[in-house]
């Protein structure tokens, strides 16, 4: 595929100092191991500093252990932390690989064009790189207006750059974590309970008697305390119900596995509601007291019998009934987990609504073993005298009239707004990207490249030479989480806790923490008034002192627990006002009705694959996060490529054997860049294939990851947008197999 | 004293955290591991298909073919039945690798044979093994079989279990709960 006039530059020419540093640090760890007779080091010989993990969004608090020479030896979960509970997942345990990875970005880079017209990166000093960005940003401000930029972020760096952009007078901030991931569940649960889901999801699984997963493959998505809670539930002999076209890890542990035809979940959910209501299994008292619109719902699901759903979902009607009875028997200690990556078919908010409504019928919201109402400790903002300038327009002006319930900026809308055909009034002319290689996240690459070509400036901040860096004008090497301060992790949970991150070691190479980068750029943009502090330590210390702690204390404990008097469950007969129009749990959504959306979820039939094509189902592996960990020396060892799961019956039709190299081609003729091995397994429906997302890296600078496995994102060319919150439904794509290496029409530049 | 480990296949999600935790705890060089995950699938889609994971490592057998075949005495048994290799006495001949029915040993790049030690350096300090402590599902249980109240004794009393290759007569001390 011809990509873009913005030539992809393979980051080259590591500074010699960088190589020397890399050599010595990485080498010394190995050497220490080789020389000693007992290769293990006793904890008494190690010192430790606190952090919270940045390998995924769960942000588990941890201890970084170092030896006497100051080398990081291991990472161990913090016992006090609710996310970690003394343990890290494999990615967290292998997090030190992020620090030691010799492929890391090492120097700031600026795109230049040579006399021959070829583009290349020049290594520059920080001052020059930041000066270059500031000049370009001022140019965009002058030529178009300060609003004409977009910020795309993920993880801890987000706060630092959001603050900078706000100070600059720009609120076009967005995260793929919303419109390409968790957005629909936020919108669906919010419409029902007047409260979104948040992270960690407040499903009270460790106290549940029945947990229901709709396509959520816990154990493969390795969200630490979530996995721990499910394990506790197994100890407690809780029932587990799993709806998945694949015998996922958790499906293999389930009481009931419902191997559903992809895209038909809403039919199943409607049938479950039918059984719960018409067999009078729902929590009558709870619904009478707290819910609005029960009669409308009852009438709505009258015809949605298990027999009706069976024809659509391919699930045995008896199993639909039996599983509904199982959850009802456990209620209110029963919960449908909201899931996380929920942008599937474009009617995802409605599917999440249906899930939320079943939680309501079970009387689960606000009940022990159902969903708890989390508490948090707020940290006050560091005082500044300056006032944030009011932008003339923001993401809301180009989003809200179309997707009325979008709660934050949508990456896909901001990319649309970056196209040359978008009205000039709201056209985006500069991208600032931090912590996300979103070229590997956002479907519809053609549009992505067109949008990139229209930008006056693209800045990418990352620790690794991810594919997105090759398209940047300026690449800034960020320090890893083990080398930097960040704002504290708060977040709602069963108890209010704050987790602290500090550098365990000095930044390797010429990398800098995000807070430093933002502050420097702020200064260069003349925004001194927003940075009355010298470093983030000063800010954190001030914040901690406002809540009765200090930097000194946090360095020792890492996680602080605060008293909260709020109950996380509804009290018996409590008169609780939900944050909805009616103050009730809305089975019938008055908000959706007002806005012209279906107030009750309807089943829409989605496309089925043509003969010879299969549903492309993708998911996660426990040792990887998105596309960002495949080059980690520890994690790539555990899994260095993905494979394509195919039912043996399907494979037989194609003459494919286990371990054969195959390529995938989607319904629009797009062929995967690389091959992957066929994995023949009975664990999947014959009409579907499954792959772990995040593989198939193309950048040669990712030496362990490049060329390994198939990237699902380029194969996702058909995207159905959720009309309610604007999420990109990505499961509407089908693939077929190529058993011979396809000829390339045009090599990627 | 008889150290043993139980592994609850009902809870394991095959995440391989035990593998990484062992690597970082014991400085196992990249490219090698002392423990590993096995996925076992049987049956056919959709009615009968089943799957479970196992976390495997040296079984610290009661009857040790690895120790018997070692020509230098580098492979030996220490208190509690832990099978160890003294690195500077090992000539890397690989006889123990041949003898082990569980493929639990590997050749360290330095030339000696390496394997799981049940983290004896941690046990000596009253801690658990690194893999037990890190496991997010708590599916690994360690302890002293001579103590009827130890977690591992209790787990074996309360659950059905099996061992791998019982026909080899090695009396392995890694028990799989089912």
Image: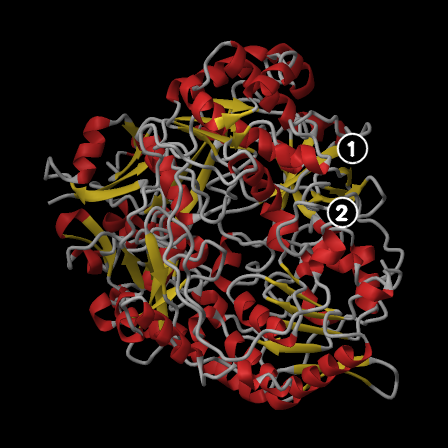
> Which chain is indicated by disc 1?
A
Q: Label for residue A402?
A: 2
Residue A296 location, x and y as percent? Answer: 61, 19
Residue A421 location, x and y as percent? Answer: 89, 60
Taking depth in this image into account, of A555 and B119 the one nearest to the observer is A555
Q: Which SS class for mark 2?
A: loop
Image quarter of residue A546? bottom left
Seen in the picture, residue A660 relative to A701 is either above or below; the reply is above
Q: Kindly report which numbered mark, 1 or 2, lies closer to the viewer in this rendering.
A: 2
Residue A33 location, x and y as percent? Answer: 34, 71
In the displayed structure, does residue A551 sit left or right of residue A743?
Answer: left
In the displayed structure, does residue A153 sit left or right of residue A32?
Answer: right
> Which chain is indicated by disc 2?
A
Residue that numbered label 1 is attached to: A613
Seen in the picture, residue A477 relative to A222 is either above or below; the reply is below
Q: Earlier in the sequence, mark 1 or mark 2?
A: 2
Image quarter of residue A745? bottom right
Q: Which SS class for mark 1?
A: loop
Residue B139 location, x and y as percent? Answer: 32, 40
Q: How many marks?
A: 2
Query: Residue sitting at 35 percent across and 34 percent down?
Result: A570
């Amino acid at each position: 595929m011809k990509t873009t006039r913005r030539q992809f530059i393979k980051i080259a020419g590591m500074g010699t100092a960088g190589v020397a540093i890399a050599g010595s640090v990485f080498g010394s760890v190995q050497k220490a191991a080789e020389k000693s007779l007992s290769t293990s080091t006793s904890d008494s010989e190690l010192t430790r500093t606190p952090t919270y993990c940045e390998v995924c969004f769960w942000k588990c608090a941890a201890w970084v252990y170092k030896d006497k020479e100051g080398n990081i030896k291991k990472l161990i979960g913090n016992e006090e932390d609710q996310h970690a509970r003394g343990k890290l997942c494999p990615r967290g345990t292998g997090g030190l690989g992020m620090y030691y990875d010799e492929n890391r970005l090492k120097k700031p880079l600026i795109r230049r064009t040579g006399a021959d017209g070829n583009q290349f990166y020049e290594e520059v000093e920080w001052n020059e790189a930041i000066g270059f960005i500031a000049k370009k940003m001022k140019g965009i401000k002058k030529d178009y207006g300060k609003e004409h930029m977009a910020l795309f972020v993920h993880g801890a760096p987000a706060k630092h750059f959001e603050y900078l952009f706000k100070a600059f007078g720009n609120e076009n901030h967005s995260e793929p974590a919303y419109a390409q991931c968790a957005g629909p569940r936020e919108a669906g649960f919010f419409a029902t309970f007047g409260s979104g889901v948040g992270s960690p999801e407040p499903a009270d699984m460790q106290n549940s008697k029945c947990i229901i997963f709709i396509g959520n493959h816990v154990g493969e998505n390795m969200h630490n305390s979530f996995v721990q809670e499910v394990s506790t539930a197994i100890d407690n002999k809780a029932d587990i119900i799993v709806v998945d076209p694949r015998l996922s890890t958790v499906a293999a542990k389930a009481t009931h596995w419902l191997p559903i035809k992809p895209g038909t979940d809403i039919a199943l959910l409607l049938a479950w509601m039918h059984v719960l209501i018409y067999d009078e299994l729902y929590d009558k008292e709870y619904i009478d007291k707290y819910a609005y619109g029960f009669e409308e719902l009852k009438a709505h699901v009258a015809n949605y019998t298990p027999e009706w759903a069976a024809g659509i979902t391919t699930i045995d009607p008896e199993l639909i009934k039996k599983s509904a009875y199982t959850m009802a028997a456990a209620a209110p200690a029963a919960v449908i987990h909201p899931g996380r990556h929920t942008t599937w078919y474009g009617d995802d908010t409605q599917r999440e609504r249906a899930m939320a409504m079943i939680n309501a019928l079970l009387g689960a919201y606000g009940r022990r073993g159902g969903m708890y109402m989390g508490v948090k400790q707020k940290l006050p903002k560091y005082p500044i005298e300056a006032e944030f300038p009011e932008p003339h327009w923001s993401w809301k002006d180009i989003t809200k009239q179309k997707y009325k319930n979008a709660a934050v900026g949508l990456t896909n809308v901001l990319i649309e707004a970056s196209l040359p055909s978008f009205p000039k009034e709201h056209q985006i002319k500069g991208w600032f990207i931090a912590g996300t290689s979103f070229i590997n996240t956002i479907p519809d690459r053609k549009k992505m490249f067109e949008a990139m070509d229209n930008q006056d400036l693209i800045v990418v901040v990352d620790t690794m030479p991810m594919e997105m860096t090759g398209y940047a004008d300026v690449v800034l090497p960020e320090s890893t989480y083990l080398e930097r301060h960040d704002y504290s992790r708060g977040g709602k949970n069963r108890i209010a806790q704050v987790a602290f991150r500090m550098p365990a070691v000095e930044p390797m190479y010429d990398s800098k923490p995000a807070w430093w980068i933002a502050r420097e750029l702020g200064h260069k943009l003349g925004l001194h008034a927003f940075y009355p502090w010298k470093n983030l330590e000063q800010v954190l210390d001030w914040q901690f002192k406002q809540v009765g702690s200090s930097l000194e204390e946090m360095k020792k404990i890492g996680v602080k627990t605060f008293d909260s008097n709020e109950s996380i469950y509804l009290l018996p007969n409590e008169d609780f006002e939900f944050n909805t129009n009616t103050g009730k749990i809305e089975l019938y959504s008055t908000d959706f009705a007002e806005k012209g959306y279906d107030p009750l979820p309807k089943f829409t039939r989605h496309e089925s694959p043509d003969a010879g094509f299969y549903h492309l189902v993708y998911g996660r592996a426990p040792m990887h996060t998105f596309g960002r960990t495949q080059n980690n020396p520890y994690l790539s060892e555990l899994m260095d490529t993905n494979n394509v799961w195919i039912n043996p019956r399907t494979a037989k039709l194609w003459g494919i054997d286990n371990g054969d190299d195959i390529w995938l081609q989607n319904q629009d003729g797009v062929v995967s860049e690389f091959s992957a091995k066929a994995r023949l397994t009975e664990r999947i429906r014959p009409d579907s294939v499954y792959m772990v997302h995040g593989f198939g890296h193309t950048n040669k600078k990712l030496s362990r990851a490049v060329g390994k496995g198939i990237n699902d994102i380029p194969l996702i060319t058909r995207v159905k947008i959720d009309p309610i919150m604007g999420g990109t439904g990505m499961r509407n794509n089908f693939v077929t197999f190529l058993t011979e290496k396809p000829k390339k029409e045009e090599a990627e530049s | 004293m008889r150290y043993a480990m139980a592994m609850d296949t009902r809870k394991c999600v095959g995440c391989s955290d035990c593998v990484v935790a062992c690597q970082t705890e014991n400085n196992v060089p990249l490219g090698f591991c002392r423990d590993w995950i096995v996925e076992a699938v049987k049956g056919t889609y959709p009615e009968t298909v089943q799957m479970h994971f196992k976390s495997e490592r040296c079984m610290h057998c009661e009857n040790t073919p690895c120790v018997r075949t070692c020509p230098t005495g580098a492979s030996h048994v220490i208190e509690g039945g832990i099978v160890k290799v003294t690195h500077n006495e090992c000539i890397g001949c690989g006889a123990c690798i041949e003898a082990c029915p569980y493929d639990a040993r590997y050749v360290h790049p330095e030339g000696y044979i390496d394997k799981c030690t049940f983290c004896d350096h941690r046990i000596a300090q009253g801690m658990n093994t690194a893999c037990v402590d890190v496991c997010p599902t708590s599916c690994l249980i360690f302890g002293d079989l001579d103590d009827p109240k130890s977690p591992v004794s209790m787990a074996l009393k309360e659950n059905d279990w099996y061992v791998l290759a019982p026909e080899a007569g090695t009396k392995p001390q890694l028990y799989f709960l089912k």
